[in-house]
Amino acid sequence: MIVVMADSDREYRRAFYRALNVHQGAAGLSDEEEFERYYVPVYGQDDGPAGPDLVKEIATAIDFTTGGSVQLLSGYRGAGKTTELLRLCRELDPETYVPVYWDVEDYFNTELPLEEGAFLVGLAAGFVASCKEAEIPEDGLGTRLKQFLDRIDVTAGLGVGAAAGSVALNVKVALQDDESFRAQVEEALRSNRRRFRQEVHAFFEEMVDAMPGGRTPVFVVDSIDHYRGSASTFDEVRESVESLFSVYASELMLPRMHVVYTVPVYARPAGWDGQIWPVLNVKVRERDGSDCREGIDLLREVLERRAPGGDLERLLGNEVERVIKNSGGLFRDLFRLVSALLLKDGPLPVSRTEIDSAERRERSQLVAGLTQEQWEILQSVHRTHQLLPSRDRAADAWSLHRLGNVLCYRNGAVDWFGVRPLLDPLLTERA
């Protein structure tokens, strides 16, 4: 919890708001700093409100595999995947492994279809760029990246003697802004895929050899799950992601290292025979609509860790559980709703009227622009606790996931779906 002593209500609000919005402002925290200050274990038991401890299982799979492995992690935006990936990096044996974390959104627009060749080149550049944050010496990494590009006949105006960070940065800029560079990459892949794959793997072999102390890299590749596109491009984007992990699975199996890729929940790579680990929402109510006490208490602890002095009631009074339950167990939306209440200007704790107002605004944002087809999907999920859209409605269904309108929970070994509790009154009206 925050140990700030907030004498005035405004000081309390300010400190709490900043703790919920740590990436904003000049003093914003990194993901690692946020983890260090505020992390609450959400996987304390195998059949807990957030499902099994996937990080422990992934770490065990890595430890049990000789030579290298590929793990796929799927989940829902705002459910805490990145936090758990950072936890994985921390829990690996530092004498044996060196974690390298890379966010693909730093290089690619996830609203557009994924280009396989560009992704593989980005994978190489992203690894080099992320080595600095992993405190891996940069000696020669930039040169090796440049040599790799030369071997596949791709140029980007890179100097041979450039530092690792500048070479990787130039590749990043070229992937984002230079269509001719991306065209070179795709041509190199299409013209001789076998050679392209060999050069990608040879580059990563060199990266493994460069690791200090002979440690094995664990390369965490985050945010591929953000590839969704729009309603008109959903099928194209989905097919591009599935193609990457099906057609190019051998390219993604990087030699002598372990790789963890995040993938969208809708992706079903054909022929993929490895594990796909799902990150679920924290369950705040059971399938029959009754409260899930363990999940509510867990999210209370999450908020108390960020509240000044751990005093959550100073803001919410007797309405703590109401706010938590209406979040549906989605961290992102819980933080947004509490942040909105912190911006109110009345005395503390906030009144029911103020909570009503904040929830109405949140509800309006959740349903803005929903189509009749999406309302029908919500009604079906609300009634059956299943999400089984026809192919022509798949984009609508996964868009509802992205918005946080449809949430996934687990009872034992069974996953089930629910509608965000804030929408219950609207669904009742439309029934």
Image (spheres, rainbow, N blue to C red):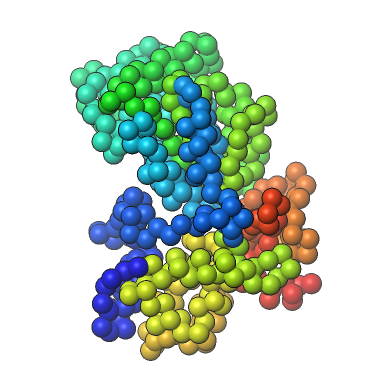
Estimate the x, y position of residue 44 in percent, counting from the top left: 51, 56
Residue at 61% across, 31% down = 274
- Is the residue 391 above or below the residue 140 in the image? below
**How many marks can you see?**
0
- Is the residue 117 above or below the residue 53 in the image? above
Residue at 74% across, 75% down = 428
Residue 103 visible in rendering: yes
State which quarter of the image contains the C terminus: bottom right
- Is the residue 375 above or below the residue 180 in the image? below
Q: 392 or 11: which is nearer to us? A: 11
State which quarter of the image contains the N terminus: bottom left
Residue at 68% across, 29% down = 270
| Residue 88: quarter of image | top left
Estimate the x, y position of residue 49 in percent, counting from the top left: 59, 60
Q: 393 or 248: which is nearer to us? A: 248
Residue 369 visible in rendering: no
Is residue 96 shown left or right of residue 11? right
Residue at 64% across, 57% down = 409
Is residue 148 shown left or right of residue 139? right
Q: 234 or 10: which is nearer to us? A: 10
- Is the residue 105 above or below the residue 332 in the image? above
Is residue 358 shown left or right of residue 25? right
